[in-house]
Amino acid sequence: MTGCQKHNKIPFYTKIDKQNLKKIVDELGINDIINKRIGDLSGGQKQRVLLARSLIRNPKMIILDEPQTGLDINITRELYKILEKLNKEKNVTIIMATHDLDELDNIKPRIICIAKTVKYDGRFEDWKGF
């Protein structure tokens, strides 16, 4: 989760980006950590900061690769709730590679299982595993 940036623009972040950041920081509940160094943050805090960064330009899609790696179960559930809210309330498409299907049971996402070829593409409820 690093976000999309326009490298040919100065300033790096526009006034609108900074206004969006304030809203996003409030929504993600990271006001207390926004000025800390990234190296001083916990895994869950880092994920929320990186998610905030990726949301600054109001993306239509977010692609995640094992976003729960290194997070405890409670922080993982919190992250998935945030992602579910983004999908339902802001219509953000979320594509996520994960092995953590147990925690996705409440969200009921569309599943695409890939192992060299597509092995399954369908509803979570119909997933039987392999």
Image (cartoon, grey):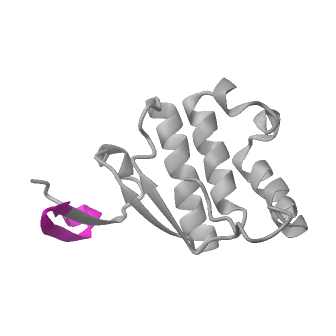
Q: Nearer the viewer, residue 5 or 120?
A: 5
Magenta-span inclusion, residue 116: yes
Position of 20 with respect to 126 (left or right) is: right
How far across and down, in percent of the image, does residue 86 sit? 59, 63
Q: Is residue 29 left or right of residue 68?
A: right
Q: Quadrant of residue 113?
A: bottom left
Residue at (75% x, 56% y) in the render: 24
Q: Position of residue 58 (x, y in %)?
A: 68, 70
Residue at 79% across / 50% down in the picture? 26
Q: Is residue 15 left or right of residue 70?
A: right
Name the spot of residue 73 as percent of width and height, x first. Answer: 44, 32
- Give the residues drawn in magenta, as a range: 114-126
Magenta span dominant secondary structure: strand
Which residue is at the far right? Answer: 15
55 or 100, which is in the foreground?
Answer: 55
Q: Is residue 41 above or below residue 117?
A: above
Q: Residue drawn 61% across and 52% down?
A: 51
Q: Quick check: 86 left or right of 104?
A: right
Determine if the magenta segment contains residue 14: no
Which one is nearer the viewer's eye here, 13 or 24? 13
Quick one: which residue is furthest to the left in this view? 130
Q: Looking at the picture, does residue 67 appear above or below residue 40?
A: below
Return the residue found at the far top: 40
Residue 1 in percent (x, y) is at 55, 53
